[in-house]
Every structure is written in C-alpha cells, then in structure tokens.
Image (cartoon, rainbow, N blue to C red):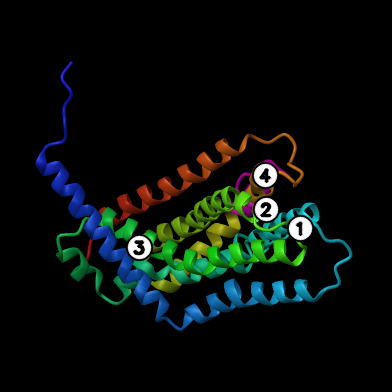
Amino acid sequence: MKLQLPNKKIIKELIENLEEIHIISSDVFSTNIHERKMLLAVLYYVIVPLINLLILSLAPIVQKGTGIAIFQAQFATTELVKNYFVSFFLGQILIALLTADQIAGEFERDTFALLRSKPIHDFSIVIGKFLGMIYTLIVMILPVSIVYYYSLLGIYGAEWPWTYLKSLDEILAISLLIVLMLGSVVGISLLASSIFSKSLHAIIATLLGLFGINLMGDALFGKNNYLALSWYVDAIFPDIFYNLEPLKDIPNAISLVLILLTANVSFLLVSSIILMNREVY
C-alpha cells in the first residue's frame, strides 16, 4: 500500500490557517491587556492570591521541614486553584465577562463583516479568539500558581534544591490541567458569543449556562459532580500531588483529562459550525 503524503495545496492551507489563528489570537491578547476590565481580573487572579500568600507567610509556623512543606504547598495550591480560578463564583464569572463579547462584540460593533471579508476561515476566528483568551488567562494565573507553590515550600522550610526540582513535573501537570479547565469555561463563553449579536446577551447566556451546568451536575451526579470544575481539582490533583488524599470511586486522572479535552474541542467545533452558518448584514 502506497503512503499518500499531503500535497502542496493542503500544506499551504494549513500554514495559512495557522497564520490566521496566530494573528487573531495575538490581536485578542494585545487588546485584552489594554482593556480596563482586565484590571478587575488582575485584582482577583493576581493581587488577592498574593495577599493571601503574604498572610500565610506571616502566620506562626509550628512545624517546618520538607514533608510538612510539601503537604502545605500541595494543599494550599489545590485550594487556590479550586476556590479562586475555577469556582463557579468569581472565577468562572470573570472569565465569562472577559470572553463572552469576543464574537458578539464583533457583530455589535459591525466589524465582523469586515473580518469575514478577509481571507479568514470562521473556524480560525473561533480558535484564534479561544487561544487569545487562554494566553490572557495563563499570563495571570499560571505564574501566580507557581509562585504560590514554591513560596510555600520556602515558608515551611523544604530542602533546597532537590524538593524544588522534584516538583517541576507536578507544576507542569497542574499547569496543563488549569489550562484545560479554563478552556472549558472560555469555550462555553465563545459558544454563547457565537450565537448572540449583543455582548450583554452573550454574557447573560454564558452565566445562565454555567449556572445550569453546575445545577445539572449536582442533580445528576451528587458528590461526584463531573460537570463541576472544582470537583476535577479534587479528583485529579491527588494523582499529581502524592501527599493528598484522593477521592474514592472516580475514574483515573487520564480519563478525566480526556473528558476536559473533549469538552474543549466540542465547544470550539460547535461554535465554529454556528458561526459559519450565521449571516452578516
């Protein structure tokens, strides 16, 4: 059987699509960092966790050592990610406010027609918007999570440098998980943004959708709420952080990561299909 290699036309289209996605994502990122509403995100995602870290550093420490340092760093970082970044309260609400107008805002400002008049595919627009928002969130959230973890190792007197070096694989794993969880919320927001032509309507739809998903998860699954991102933190982090107690009767971490990855791809695919079938007046 002869192996069929991609022809030059297909390769050229793939390269062009990547360039389109890069241009759109870079534009979204640069626009975001100049938006005033980003100050609220910086306050919540960066300043508040660092203040919390400062308070922890000033609290009296009864016991120090590598073992207690690892446990405290793992436990506190898990709580940080769960309560600040992926909770339904402010964590997801802020992502919705930042993301839900990405496509709806183009319709509202009558700029989508101009965007579509260029040789840009609709799915490139969706993926570019998605990546631009992920870049924006990563710049704020990942450095804070890493600083938080390593600072606690230092506060509780972990052995230098071996404990810090051995934690690199854990940091990489939780970084991937954070990106996937944030991507799920961004994907839902872009889905609403691709349906509605008004930013306010897209934001309200996103918030109602997130609220409905959490309620439905509680009703269907109870304690093992597969639709609550905070549950994914409790379920997967113990597999990454060997000092934490894992939840019982759950699928393995790889299966849960695949569920999150599938959700990300599904939201992007559906958003692209909706956008391709929308008419621009």
Q: Quadrant of residue 102?
A: bottom left
Q: Earlier in the sequence, mark 4 or mark 3?
A: 3
The first of marks 2 and 1 along the sequence is: 1
Residue bearing mark 1: 69
Place of residue 125 in the rendered image (x, y in percent of width and height, measured from the top left): 28, 60
- Where the C terminus falls, by quadrant? bottom left
Mark 4 and mark 2: Cα distance apart in space: 24 Å
Q: Secondary structure at mark 3?
A: helix
Q: Amino acid at mark 4?
A: Ala
Q: x and y percent of residue 75 in the render?
A: 74, 56
Q: Nearer the viewer, residue 82 or 51?
A: 51
Q: Secondary structure at mark 2?
A: helix
Alpha-carbon neighbours of circle 1 within 10 Å: few (<14), some, or many (≥20)? many
Query: Which badge, 1 or 4, is on the more N-terminal residue?
Result: 1
Q: Is residue 221 magenta?
A: yes
**Which residue is at the front of the view, 132 or 165?**
165
Q: Nearer the viewer, mark 3 or mark 1?
A: 1
- First in sequence: mark 3 or mark 2? 3
Say which residue appears at 35% left-offset and 74% top-offset: 30
The three-letter amino acid code for the residue at tag 3 is: Lys
Identify residue type, mark 2.
Answer: Thr
Nearest to the eye among marks 4 and 3: give it.
Answer: 4
Q: Position of residue 94 (x, y in %)?
A: 54, 70
Total numbered badges shown on the rendered structure: 4
Judging by the rendered image, the residue that carries numbered circle 2 is: 163
Q: Which residues are magenta?
A: 213-230
> In terms of image quadrants, where is residue 198?
bottom left
- Tell me if residue 47 comes above or below residue 268 in the rendering: below
Tag 4 residue: 235
Q: Where the N terminus falls, by quadrant?
A: top left
